[in-house]
Amino acid sequence: MSLARRLSAPLAWALLLAALMLLMPLFEEVFRLVAPDTRAVIYQRDSFASLVANHLLLVGVASLCAIVVGMGAAILVTRQWGRDFLPLVSQLASIGQTFPPVAVLALAVPVLGFGSQPTIVALILYGLLPIVRNTLVGIQGIAPGVMESARGMGMSGRQILWQVELPLARPVILAGIRTSVTINIATAAIGSTIGARTLGDPIIAGIVNGNTAFILQGALLIALLALCVDSLFERLQLR
Amino acid sequence: MADERQAAAAKIELDAVTKRFGDVTAVDAIRLAIPRGELCVLVGTSGCGKSTTLRMINRLIEHTAGQIRIDGQQIRDFDEQRLRRRIGYAIQSTGLFPHWTVARNIGLVPRLLRWPASRIAARVSELLALLGLDESEFAGKYPHQLSGGQAQRIGVARALAADPEVLLMDEPFGALDPITRESLQDELLRLQSRLHKTIVFVTHDMDEALKLADRIVVMDAGRIVQQGSAEALLQAPADAFVESLLGGRDRGLKHAALTRVAERMRPLSDAQRGDQALETLSVAADDSLRQALSLMLWHGVDSLLVNDVEGQMVGSLSLRDVVVARGANS
Ligand SMILES: Nc1ncnc2c1ncn2[C@@H]1O[C@H](COP(=O)(O)OP(=O)(O)O)[C@@H](O)[C@H]1O
Ligand SMILES: [Mg+2]
């Protein structure tokens, strides 16, 4: 597949996102249909572009941390010497997932204050499980004969990790990262409740003021952002 | 002086080697000396400790007690990765890397040893040719594109890549269909007659052991029950267990399968050659007595003509020749 074709779907979503983000006022009449009684139909407190950028930044930083921590932990507990911690790590990761993100935020605020930092912490915790779980599954799913012959041929632990385990587990790990990032694009909006600037801002403003148009604008942009990133991962996995 | 001692010493020695997994004693104080160039087959029922014994030699499993020596040197004195790069290893599931091409798989150990790329490429070509696989067809293939027999050949090629003196094989042909298995066994014997590696070969199949082994080591419950040549085992199984492994009442046929027609036939004189009726059935001198016997049974005859590889009539074989070795009337 050529690069252009491979990127066509993500590119289409990105263009749609950019168009809506920059040209939202052009659709004023459309949004008036869902909120006929309000004065301001288009959310104006922040530019949509800066909200999208900040939203992406939060998700990006959190995902990067979740990838490093999650893959790192999964790799450590699949080494011979780290095997004792395997049950602990898989349990911790699933607890992270069962915790509602709002609760994580509420707990993080007293420690980290309001704003971006507690949001990032919550997103990291929330995004860990799919990455840890898929990295574990990917590595443990390698045929035992492959691992045995890798050792039997005299490869070092590091060579086995980089040349055998990670390449073979790659599709499964990528699927985990994809899930994690996509979930977090949606979850990040909750950060707006504790003062992080995200695409949740118009949604919350809409809820507070009873303005359905604001809610729709925030939700649409979040959905497009998620689709855009998701299709990018889909292409990455196909390689 | 040192050379002499090395020549006399076994290539691989196991000296009272024991392996315990918790309470389970998988291998129990085994003593075994395998001379250089010998094909030694460990045979026994499943769970008797064959694989454990094999994997202690390349330190995939560390032995609990005793000593294992290669060329007189304890394997514990080597760096384990360096040791393994000097020892070929082939297993039943092949363990080929699914994301690497055949050529890259074969070149694994040479690459670990940092051979220059040109030397690796040359070696890969050489090995593919040695195993009868066309380079242009196979070098770029991935393991999932290979048949079971081809994959196992590549596994053997990979084990031989860095020209190790010792080769460990764990039921390498166990998952193949009987016809492919037989052709790979023949190929291993052909390779061994050229390469003279010291091979430790694990199988649960006594017929395979009888066919391949210079020395058969019968194991049961972590101990060596008997060791010796195929002939020696067939002549005098140590106990009922070995006898049952040898097939009990099929023992005679197994022995016949090991003996070539050429060893029992009566050479024909030129005069006789003309006399022999053409309709008489014939076997090849290289065939086994078992094959000859089967022909006699099937066709209801009690004598066969014997041809050499060129199809020249060279002798005759009667039922009596099959049943009683000449000069040995015991
Ligand atoms: N890693 C291990 N942990 C515990 N027990 C083992 C392990 N490997 C082998 N065993 C035990 O050791 C015995 C011998 O196993 P193995 O050498 O694999 O037998 P074989 O290859 O002859 O079938 C068996 O009873 C098996 O259950
Ligand atoms: Mg075994």
Image (cartoon, rainbow, N blue to C red):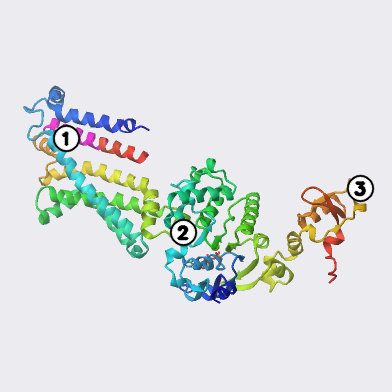
Q: What's the chain of the residue with tag 2? A: A
- Pointer 2: what residue? A153
- Pointer 1: what residue? A218
Identified at 15% across, 34% down, the residue is: A215
Magenta stretch in the rendered image: A211-227
- Residue A147's place in the image compared with B240, above or below, is above
Residue type for callout 1: Gly
Question: Which structural element holds mark 3?
Answer: loop
Nearest to the observer: residue A67 or residue A129: A67
Q: What's the chain of the residue with tag 3? A: B
N-term-proximal mark, 2 vs 1: 2
Mark 3 vs mark 2: tell me if same chain: no
| Ligand 2 - quadrant of the structure image | bottom right
Nearest to the observer: residue A114 or residue B29: B29
Residue A147, image x and y in percent?
44, 57
- Residues under numbered marks 2 and 1 in contact, where contact means CB atoms less than 8 Å apart: no
Residue B265, image x and y in percent?
83, 58
Left or right placement of residue B220 versus residue A88 in this view = right
What whole-number distance in Å separates the C-alpha atoms at marks 3 and 1? Answer: 101 Å
- State the residue lying farthest toward the front: B1
What whole-number distance in Å separates the C-alpha atoms at marks 2 and 1? Answer: 56 Å
Q: Determine if the C-beta at disc 3 is less than 8 A from ligand 1.
A: no
Question: Which structural element holds mark 2?
Answer: loop
- Pointer 3: what residue? B277
Residue B164, image x and y in percent?
52, 61
Left or right placement of residue B140 versus residue B185 in this view = left
Identified at 26% across, 35% down, the residue is: A228
Q: What is the crowding at mark 3: few (fewer than 14 residues within 10 Å), some, or many (at least 20)?
A: few
